[in-house]
């Protein structure tokens, strides 16, 4: 069984995923895969570099040929059309590679696997999951964490949060919700509860197959 896990930026998805992993549930992170598909030598990076070669200064590449993520982020968050173009280049490649990673994890014999993705719903990756778990925190906390973690000002942090799916819509599409606005102990207790539930569901599915 594949559990799709999502949440707004800085909601603590990776921390929650590690808590699940400690209980025996492996995971693949769409953010990691997104970085893979824009590494030097990848077709997606070549397309991105070509599109923004006209930008003033170094464009969107660092001196060593790697992607300047900050420069690209400033472009796409300032222009929704550019963000859609970028997604059209990267999302199909990310999805194909996620399928490969998930197949390997499922073959490992784990009771269930996690697909961790900030764009689970927006990208259509939720179609790959049997259930969807939303990691939820208040927007004010998202903005605070984003500004501190990514070294951006509050205005840019707000823009990043605003560019994502509205919190209410994300929650409405969830099968399960984990409130991650409290202590680590509370988070781990909720993860343990969900782990038991997912193992039960996996067992039930295996009996009907």
Image (cartoon, rainbow, N blue to C red):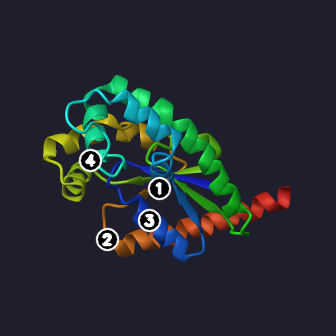
Relative to 2, is 14 on the left or the right? left
Instruction: Look at mark 4 in the image and give the residue it sits on.
Output: 139
Q: Residues within 10 Å of mark 3 (few under 14, many from 20)?
A: many
Kind of element beneath mark 2: loop
Q: Is residue 90 above or below residue 12?
A: above
Looking at the picture, how far across and down is residue 60, in whole percent? 30, 39
- Which label lies toward us, 2 or 1? 1
Looking at the picture, how far across and down is residue 207, in whole percent? 84, 61
Instruction: Give yes or no for contact between labels 2 and 3 (Cβ–Cβ under 8 Å).
Output: no
Kind of element beneath mark 4: helix
Relative to 200, is 69 on the left or the right? left
- Which label lies toward us, 1 or 3? 1
For marks 1 and 3, give the CA distance. Answer: 16 Å
For the point 38% across and 35% down, which residue is it? 49
Mark with earlier residue (2, 4): 4
Image quadrant holding the C terminus, namely bottom right
- Which label lies toward us, 4 or 1? 1
Mark with earlier residue (1, 3): 3
Residue 125 seen in this snapshot: no
Instruction: Look at mark 1 in the image and give the residue it sits on.
Output: 32
Instruction: Look at mark 2 in the image and give the residue it sits on.
Output: 183
Mark with earlier residue (2, 1): 1
- Which label lies toward us, 2 or 3? 3
Image quadrant holding the N terminus, namely bottom right
């Amino acid at each position: 069984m594949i559990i799709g896990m999502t949440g707004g930026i800085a909601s603590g998805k990776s921390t929650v995923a590690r808590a699940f992993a400690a209980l025996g549930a492996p995971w693949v992170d769409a953010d990691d895969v997104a970085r893979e598909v824009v590494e030097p030598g990848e077709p997606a990076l070549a397309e991105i570099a070509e599109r923004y070669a006209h930008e003033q200064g170094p464009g969107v590449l660092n001196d060593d040929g790697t992607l300047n993520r900050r420069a690209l982020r400033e472009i796409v968050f300032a222009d929704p059309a550019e963000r859609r173009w970028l997604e059209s280049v990267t999302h199909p490649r990310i999805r194909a590679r996620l399928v490969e990673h998930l197949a390997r994890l499922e073959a490992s014999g784990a009771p269930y696997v996690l697909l961790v993705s900030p764009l689970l719903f927006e990208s259509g990756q939720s179609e790959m999951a049997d259930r969807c778990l939303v990691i939820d925190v208040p927007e004010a906390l998202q903005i605070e964490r984003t500004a501190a973690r990514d070294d951006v000002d509050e205005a840019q942090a707000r823009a990043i949060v605003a560019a994502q799916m509205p919190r209410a819509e994300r929650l409405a599409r969830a099968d399960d919700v984990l409130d991650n606005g409290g202590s680590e102990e509370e988070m781990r207790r909720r993860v343990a509860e969900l782990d038991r539930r997912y193992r039960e569901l996996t067992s039930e599915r295996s009996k009907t197959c």
